[in-house]
Image: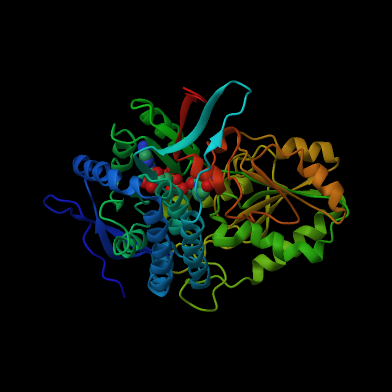
Amino acid sequence: MPTIEPERVPGPGAAGFPVVDPATGEAYDEAPDQQPGELDTVIDRAQRAWSGWRADPAARTTALRAAADAVEAAGEDLARSLTREQGKPLAESHAEVARTAARLRYFADLAPRTRPIDDGRPVRSEVRWRSLGPVAAIVPWNFPLQLAAAKFAPALAAGNTVVLKPSPFTPLTTRMLGSVLAAVLPEDVLTVVTGREPLGARLVSHPGFRHVTFTGSVSTGRAVARAAAASLARVTLELGGNDAAVLLDDVDVERIADRLFWAAFRNCGQVCMAVKRLYVPARLYADVVEALAQRAKTVAVGPGLDPATELGPVNNVPQLARVEGLTRQALADGARAAAGGHRLDGPGYFFAPTVLVDVPPDSPVVTGEQFGPVLPVLPYRSLDEAVEAANGTGFGLGGSVWGTDLDRAEAVAERLDCGTAWVNHHAELSLAQPFAGVKDSGVGVAGGPWGLYGNLQPFVVHRPREA
Ligand code: NAD
């Protein structure tokens, strides 16, 4: 097991704050509660490490490949730690570790392209790319490792250094990851800081950063943008979603039911791009509700470390309260639970997988983001009505359309107001694709070469062709 080394932060040593296992509701460990006053030193060191790191692209490629190997070698420890503090089934934690390594490997081999500007003038003009400097990266608790890698892998590949802050609900696995990577990366190129607020707020308002990249809720994203405005640091925001899935009248319900269920309930619904609202032709409503409710009632809910578990607990108490509150309000507004609708007895933060029917379309569980194991299913009469409803929130992360005629389904998918639209799938992502939300779901582009260029500054060299 890799030893969790103390962070490379000078000073008196931070006191700890408790980390809770969501499967038991009990604190089982502590993480350092670093104070905002420590950030000056951390960022100063990141700034100094930048000059060496940015100078040698070949050394970066080698180091980032080694980083991917090191993550894989520590896979068992990382996965167990992730399940313990996040709650997800162990197999999903292993998959998250694998995606973290894959992202490092992908960006290790990605380089920006120098581009000539050919506009007919008798000059030689060329666009080259330069790194930005220290980058602040802040991530939430639903996919602590892979979301962190989505930030630091492109930032490091571009030649920047990174200060990474995980959520206080999932600090330990990120610290372990930081320790694993410290063994293969130059000192201070990647620093993990942990602590409770206002650590994040102070981090994003620090004048030492040239790029602030944040994943989290819309309301915190707005605060981050306001804070970073003081230093005019570049801001990338990957924010909340309220993805709609629209079923068409030619859909084969039994064939898609399983995929659709997991598109909504994977990671206990705590996925930015989960299906969070489902629109179904009125004629198929009863069949779809029955198929989903049957799966919700039979799925194995339990601690993530139990090999039989398919769905773990909700990660934390505020999130559990949110899921419960939205469900109760929907039920009070006239909705019915075709499955679940309540917390599960016993220790831990378990909520019964819930399928809500007859939900008023203006209920907050439909208009807002539940981010939990609760799916409202809404009937529609005309396709225009369904598309209008799907596009009718402030969110615009993803969306999907499900049917047998793929061309027709794709034509409907093109009408969705979001960053990624799928046909007969949801939240299937490639490392090579851009990832961006529209409306309140985000600012800037992550993923693929777009993620790399988001961490670079164009630099133009312009000279005459002849003396
Ligand atoms: P959150 O906004 O509460 O917290 C996210 C992170 O920001 C945490 O690390 C937190 O400590 C930190 N933070 C809190 N206040 C801050 C401040 N004032 N300044 C700087 N940092 C601050 O979100 P959460 O509850 O941890 O995560 C759930 C949300 O994240 C959902 O809305 C979900 O959709 C979204 N999310 C989006 C994506 C995406 O890629 N678009 C991916 C995963 C999650």
Q: Position of residue 447 (x, y in %)?
A: 55, 48
Q: Position of residue 77 (x, y in %)?
A: 38, 73
Name the side, left or right, on which 160 lies relative to 407: left
Name the side, left or right, on which 122 lies relative to 30: right
Q: Is residue 195 visible?
A: yes
Going 55% across and 46% down the picture, which residue do you hit? Answer: 449
Name the side, left or right, on which 334 lies relative to 52: right
In the orientation shown, which residue stands out farthest toward the left? 12
Residue 420: quadrant of the picture: top right
Count of picture labels: 0
Image quadrant occupied by the N terminus: bottom left
Which quarter holds ligand 1?
Answer: top left
Going 84% across and 61% down the picture, which residue do you hit? Answer: 252
Q: Position of residue 396 (x, y in %)?
A: 63, 38
Q: Is residue 162 visible?
A: no
Going 50% across and 66% down the picture, which residue do you hit? Answer: 98
